[in-house]
Amino acid sequence: MTFFYLTNFYSHSAPHIIHALGCPNMPDMNELGYLGPFNNCSEASRSASKKFDNIKVCECCCDKRKKPIVNNAPC
């Protein structure tokens, strides 16, 4: 399992971006909310979409178009 975090933006136009723990593009922890432990990015995205409307995944660590599992390669 991997721990996932969600950016905390208060603008309705800005998306909430999902990051896996250890992502090089992840913002400071004070700008993130803990989403939870999940097996893959799809599970994390599904959980986040229950709480928020505008969800995106980080293209660096969590590119669900290419792989359902967290991408640990450098960006």
Image (tube, rainbow, N blue to C red):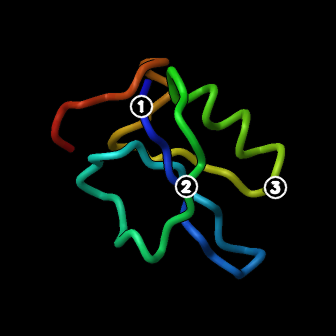
**Where 4 falls versus 32 (above or below)?**
above
What residue is shown with label 2?
34
Q: Amino acid at mark 3?
A: Asp
Within the image, what quadrant is residue 44 found in?
A: top right
Q: Quadrant of the C terminus?
A: top left
Disc 1 residue type? Answer: Thr
Q: Which residue position holds label 3? A: 53
Q: Secondary structure at mark 3?
A: loop
The answer to which of marks 2 and 1 sits earlier in the sequence is 1
* In-front residue for pair 12/20: 20
Q: Which mark is residue 28?
A: none
Residue 47 percent coordinates (x, y): 72, 37
Q: Residues within 10 Å of mark 1 (few under 14, many from 20)?
A: some
Q: Mark 1 = which residue? A: 2
Q: Nearer the viewer, residue 67 or 1?
A: 1
At 31% from the left and 28% from the top, the residue drawn is: 71
Give percent across and percent down for residue 28.
35, 72
Disc 3 crowd, CA 10 A, few/some/many (<14, 14-19, 20+):
few
Q: Nearer the viewer, mark 2 or mark 3?
A: 2
Residue 45 location, x and y as percent?
Answer: 65, 37
Which corner quadrant of the image does residue 59 belong to? top left
Residue type at tag 2: Tyr
Q: Secondary structure at mark 1?
A: strand
SS class, disc 2: strand
| Front: mark 1 or 3 | 1
